[in-house]
Image (spheres, rainbow, N blue to C red):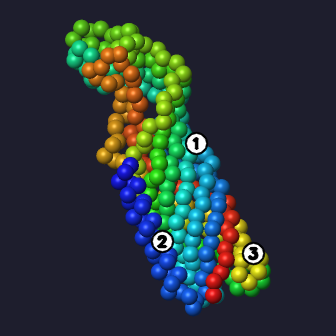
Amino acid sequence: MNTYINHIKSILGITFCLLGYQYANTQNKKQEIAMSAASTISLISHNLNNGDAKNKTGYAFDLRHSYYVNDNWSIGLGVEFQAYKSSIDFKNLSGSYTTTDYDNESFEFRYAAQNYNESQKIGKVNIPLTVQYETTTGKYRFYALTGLKVGFTTSATYQTNIGTLSTSGYYPQYDTELFDPEFMGFGTFNNIKTTKQDLDTRIAWSTTLESGVKHYLNEKQAIYVGLFFDIGLNSIADSKQKVSKDEVVIYPSGTSPVVLQYNAVSNSEYSEKMKLSSFGLKIRYAFQGL
């Protein structure tokens, strides 16, 4: 996480330097400073092999500087924060794998979960580079823009909720399956809710499309109202951290009493890819220079 924060600080520093450089070198050109806020629907796609992913509302806000090449076309550079939320649901989830108990004795850990839910929250700082076209007549003008964004994680967490979890341990050397005691992690557990845990993610690349109406309040100020769609280009799941389907529920070997732990489904083989996309309504206030 500290590495990501250092990357973000560096990128923000470079971005603001570029904005300052762009501003200093466009004093004799038409330019625009804009601030926006957006209500979004998060589309965290997982390509799940099983289970259902649900999209939830998020939000975004940004600061952007645009340089006008002519009256119709402009190039923009900015910085944006965007929050994403989603959840994954499984009616039934099960698995088994070999591990060791507190006596260092090998056994097969088995589990079956009902009503398994994982909620995810991700915050990203995006650096958008855009090209915008707008018409030039009247107070109400059409605009459309497209561009590329690179996003850096500021926070990423997941939380696990399980209606019922049944666990057991099969010892093949004794041909015996234990369904208790609970201090060994065996039994039936209800209404499990974990604390928030860190979710490992990578840099996100996306394209952005936006279109709407630009209303001039006067010669120097304008309000934009438009719809946007950000399309994720790469999977942000950390492939180095990906676990098998059987290892969603973790049995901590060699401990007593046993406290079961839970891997993120999004970083398991249940999820083929994890892409960040979103769409929503954006309102932008802009004021123009020369």
Percent position (x, y) of residue 244? 34, 36
288 and 273: which one is in front? 288
- Distance in Å between CA atoms under marks 1 and 3: 35 Å
Which one is in front in this view, the residue at disc 1 or the one at disc 3?
3
**Mark 3: which amino acid?**
His
According to the picture, the residue beneath numbered tag 3 turns out to be 215
Write down the quadrant of residue 104 in the picture: top left
As displayed, is residue 278 above or below residue 100?
below
**Mark 2: which amino acid?**
Phe
- Distance in Å between CA atoms under marks 2 and 3: 27 Å
**Mark 1: which amino acid?**
Lys
Which class describes the residues within 10 Å of circle 3: few (<14), some (14-19), or many (20+)?
A: some
Picture residue at 64% right of the left edge, 65% below the top: 36
Residue 16 badge: 2
According to the picture, the residue beneath numbered tag 1 turns out to be 54
Screen quadrant of the C terminus: bottom right
As displayed, is residue 83 above or below residue 172?
below
